Amino acid sequence: MMHSRRCITSNTRMNDAEKNEALDLFNQYERQLGDELKAAEATFNALEYKANIRRKDRVLEAQRFASMVSRIERFAEEGNRYGHALLNIVSSDAQGRMLNFNLEDRATYYRNDILSHMGDLILKFGKKGILGARGDGFQGLKGNKNAYADLLKEAEAISLGKGPATNNQQMRSFAQGWLEGAERARYLKNKFGGNVPKMEGWFIPQSHSGQKVSSVSRDEWKQFVLQRIDRSQMVDYDTGAAVTDLKLEVLLNDVYDAISKSGYVGTAKKQYNKTLERHRILKFKDAKSWIEYSEMFGDGDVFKTMVDYADKMSRDIAELEILGPRPQQTLDKLTTYVQDKAAKDPSIDVSGLPKLQDYYNVFKRKQLLVDKEWLADIGSSVRNVLTSAFLGKAQLSAISDSATSIATMKRLGKAGTEPIRRWLGQVTDTVLSPSNSKERKKFLIRAGIVMEDAINIAHAAGKFAGETDGPIWSQVLADVTMRAQGLTAWTQSMRNANALEMMSAFAENLSKNFDELDPELKITLRRYELDKDWDVLRQATPDDYKGVPMLTKNNILDLNTSAVDTDVLAANYGSMLINLINDAVIVGNIKAAANLVGAKPRGSLSGELFRSAFMFKTFPVTVFMQHLYRMATEQGMNSKILGMNVPVKAVKAYRIANFVALTTMFGALAEQLHQLAKGKDPADMTDPGFWGAALTRGGGLGFVGDVLNEQMMGYKTELFGPLSSFTRDTYGLTIGNVYDYATGEDPKFADDLLRYLKQYTPGNSLWYGELALDRLILEQTAEIMDPGVSNRLRTSARRQESKNKQRYFWSPGKTSPTRGPRLGAALGE
């Protein structure tokens, strides 16, 4: 052990860099402790701690690299697709090969696992009703600020081992669930190689508002923070010891710069990168101090802070488990490994390799980084407004979720109509017995199926629009449109229905040996690498939910076995459920985002143009990649049709035709509902052109159908998506009309304004209100401005009726329907 500064400078086993590091530590401790001997002892302990961490990290890094090389080789045994083997590390393979153990699904599972301890809390503070408010009451409009304060006080008391801090027993129960989830996150992270110490009295991570922090000077911010943090519990992650004065000074400077500039730099960045744990850098004295900081410099949203914590930790855990403590370096080494193999063997397929970094950057949320904030805000605001204006009838097209649900359930060997039946039962149950709906949600959250509609803003919008970013008012605008039309409730209900069906499908098969399982289910288990653990899964005791057995991740975690690591087995099973649910009810994913936009930052010219060009493309591209493309390219499928062995190509053709027919059928229903919502009789289904529209509407042709039909969700596409038409129409309404007036032309401003408002008014396209709004308000207002508008509208309508052979039952320009819709028109009558 070293005893003085001289011991460091004369040490022959240390190089110059190590000596400088040791001297820096020694000086800090000597200044802190005021005793050379104690400083030397603290320095020795710190250096020993750092050396142990480095050794552990090197071992873990080597183990993860070797493990992933083994997986890459096993993946490439089928098709020699080494490039896609690397993509499979980040997101499940588009061809259906080895669908488990990727960063995307793993992170989602761990987030749900962490949040599963907080079911009551999520139902209390989650988004509710049409407005997505998060207070009390059916629509969530009652405030809950006092409840948040009680929640924090109780969390602090529990963390310190104290009795109730308030008289609010409900908040104490919620606080217990939150702390259990947070501790579960810390346990999992440390299990897979993290180094997160347990802080006595830690009760919630801090949250920061860059705008609020940057509004004061660094010294003012530091003074405010120093008065409220608990120095004794702040740990230097480099040394494992209490943070020194000098280190804290540097740390706070870097944290201020990082928050005010919206990115971690310097020492704070080093701490964050090393531990992937920026939320524990500061430790507040008590709940009162945390609340004071939050009101002054935070976003004030306790629930969002908790959800963000689970999200950040889950991605950290997934990276540590799959790629180790230095994930980017491991990924780079794996890339080099594949490139070296390809250089020696030209037959190796590395076609997916150029997209790898985009995939990983999207997982790391680098596409959310902002280049020019003003441009990012403008671009996102316009797209969110267009989402609200265009996607008010997306609920009608979402009927095609039934088709993808049926196709996915077939992979489990189950009859495909069960999800639809259960969804109808859930809707009825929700209306007639809200308490049963709450009970079902609590069961699903506890089982690891989190209510996305409760924790994510504009989640349903992302399904079709592919974006949920931007200024909060614009996010709320898109979110309210999705909720008001019923799309958010539909999407969550369908996901819930599929989750229940899937868990029951696995539970009812636990009595069977693997060889006795349905052929499709066996193939699915192999693809998710659960075939080898089937006998262990069979030992689980399923939950009983209303008389139906359900196999949940908790049943696996409760297993008393040494045959497998139950944490990993539960993660394998939970990741599979997540992947299958996402197949059944399409939502945005890394594959779609990386292939459409990549990780181009918001606020960059290329990033904004790409986001606008591929707006509304997420749904068809995801349907194509997760169903049609997989059906066309997957290997090892069941080669029997109606009990007869047939060639693999015939099986693929049959499955594709079956899926396209199914989506087209639901697309036809959606198309007719769209026609009725426009005030028209149903379209003639004997016209071949109708089925082309139905094919696209149902998503069966995916992006190909979009290109062929030049439309998506019923809206014309242009080079830069709806932004092109929005820019052109805005120019025409303003500058174009001024130019016409100046040159003596009749500007017809009322006509242009009417078309503009019909097209771009947020919420105007809601399927149950658009027709009445157009006929009774917008058209009548335009008529007041220009009495000739109604005549022109009727003339245009008659022209369209003659051209399309499709009549209006409520014609433009009229204040009431002239008759009811003629349903027989659908059959050409």
Image (spheres, helix red, strand yellow):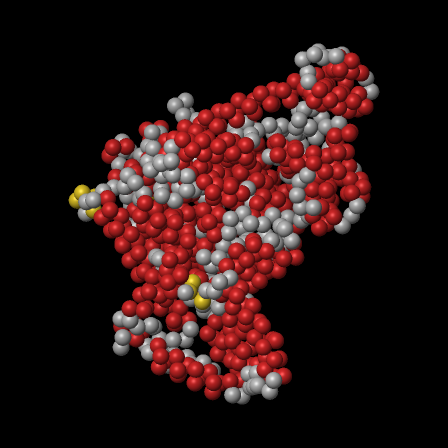
Check the image and name the residue furthest to the right. 34
Query: In this picture, is 181 found above or below 129?
Result: above
Q: Nearer the viewer, residue 429 or 633?
A: 633
- Residue 281 in the image: x percent, y percent? 67, 34
Q: Quadrant of the C terminus?
A: bottom left
Q: For this view, does 625 lie left or right of residue 644?
A: right
What residue is at 35 percent from the left and 65 percent from the top? 693
- Residue 779 appears anywhere in the view: yes
Q: Nearer the viewer, residue 170 or 26?
A: 26
- Residue 233 appears anywhere in the view: no
Q: Nearer the viewer, residue 271 or 807?
A: 271
Query: In this picture, is 574 found above or below 740?
Result: above
Q: For this view, does 366 lie left or right of residue 699?
A: right
- Residue 773 in the image: x percent, y percent? 50, 74
Q: Quadrant of residue 671?
A: bottom left
Q: Quadrant of residue 138?
A: bottom right
What residue is at 38 percent from the left and 48 percent from the top? 626
- Residue 141 in the image: x percent, y percent? 59, 58
Q: Quadrant of residue 785?
A: bottom right
Q: Nearer the viewer, residue 750 or 770?
A: 750
- Residue 491 in the image: x percent, y percent? 44, 54
What residue is at 27 percent from the left and 75 percent from the top? 828
Q: Quadrant of the N terminus?
A: top right
What residue is at 56 percent from the left and 53 percent from the top? 607
